[in-house]
Amino acid sequence: MEETRETQQPGTAPVAYQPAYPAQQPPYYAPPMQAGRWLRFRRLCRLLLRRLWYAGTLIGRALRPYAAFVVIVIALLGVIGWMSYLLWAPKEAPAAFERAESLPPAPAVETYIKGQQDYNADMMWDAYSTDYQANQLANGASKATLQAQASGMRSAGLQFVHSDYIGGVKLDGGRSMYFYTIDLARADQHGRFPYVFTADADGKIVDVDSPFLRPQTSSK
């Protein structure tokens, strides 16, 4: 009896199972960070300093044999530069001030000073204005009193050596003020005293002010 033979199927190769790995991703490339302006500036300054330091080192080595001469030249250049600055540097503008218009000396004042130098009370009294003469008389002073004072100065050896006119200015009401300095001498003593004359609109004296006269006459 024939054995029924089963048709043998060709054997199939066993399926090999490999572990599943994730696919490799391409490597991530991060672009380089750009340096900021401040960082670039610092790097540039550092590079320049290094170059300058290196150049200074080379120059120092070359000039080392002439160090004393170089120091003298640098000192002379410093002195010349400082003197040039003092000579040509801009100077501060001088303080601006308004100068009053100066007046020529009044004839009556010049007459009074001449009378003092000559011990002449007539010239001094005539240089006074009418109102000032009246004021002097009211205070007990007169031409005779003035002459007595002048004669006393002469007897004491007081001399009116020299007078300098400083200037004059206009005042309100037509009056004027005149400034003098008068040199007085007696024996070996010498002094300079300021005199201030006030004149009316006619140029006649209405007041005389001086440290030399204050103890002797009263001001108006």
Image (cartoon, rainbow, N blue to C red):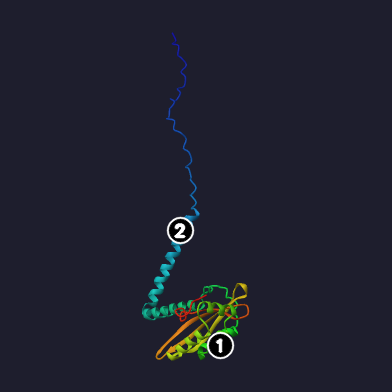
How far apart, in angstroms, are the residues tagged by discs 1 and 2? 91 Å
* Residue 102 at least partly seen: no
Depth order, front residue of 163/93: 163
Task: Answer left or right for 165 relative to 21.
Answer: right
Residue 220, image x and y in percent? 52, 75
Asked if the residues shown at circle 1 and circle 2 are in contact, with their CB atoms under 8 angstroms apart, the answer is no
* Residue 130 at least partly seen: yes
Reading the image, the residue beneath label 2 is 42
Depth order, front residue of 175/216: 216
Compared with residue 78, is residue 47 higher up or lower down, i.e. above or below?
above
The residue under label 2 is which amino acid type? Answer: Arg
Task: Answer left or right for 71 relative to 135.
Answer: left
Residue 15, disc: none
Reading the image, the residue beneath label 1 is 123
Secondary structure at numbered mark 2: helix
State which tag comes first along the sequence, 1 or 2: 2
Residue 211, image x and y in percent? 46, 79
Specify few, some or many for label 1: CA neighbours under 10 Å numbering under 14, 14-19, or 20 or more.
some
Residue 13, image x and y in percent? 44, 25
Specify few, some or many for label 2: CA neighbours under 10 Å numbering under 14, 14-19, or 20 or more.
few
Compared with residue 21, is residue 122 higher up or lower down, i.e. above or below?
below
Compared with residue 54, is residue 145 higher up or lower down, i.e. above or below?
below
Residue 194, image x and y in percent? 49, 81
The residue under label 1 is which amino acid type? Answer: Met
Residue located 47% across and 61% down the image: 44
What is the quadrant of residue 169 in the picture? bottom right
- Quarter of the image for the N terminus: give it: top left
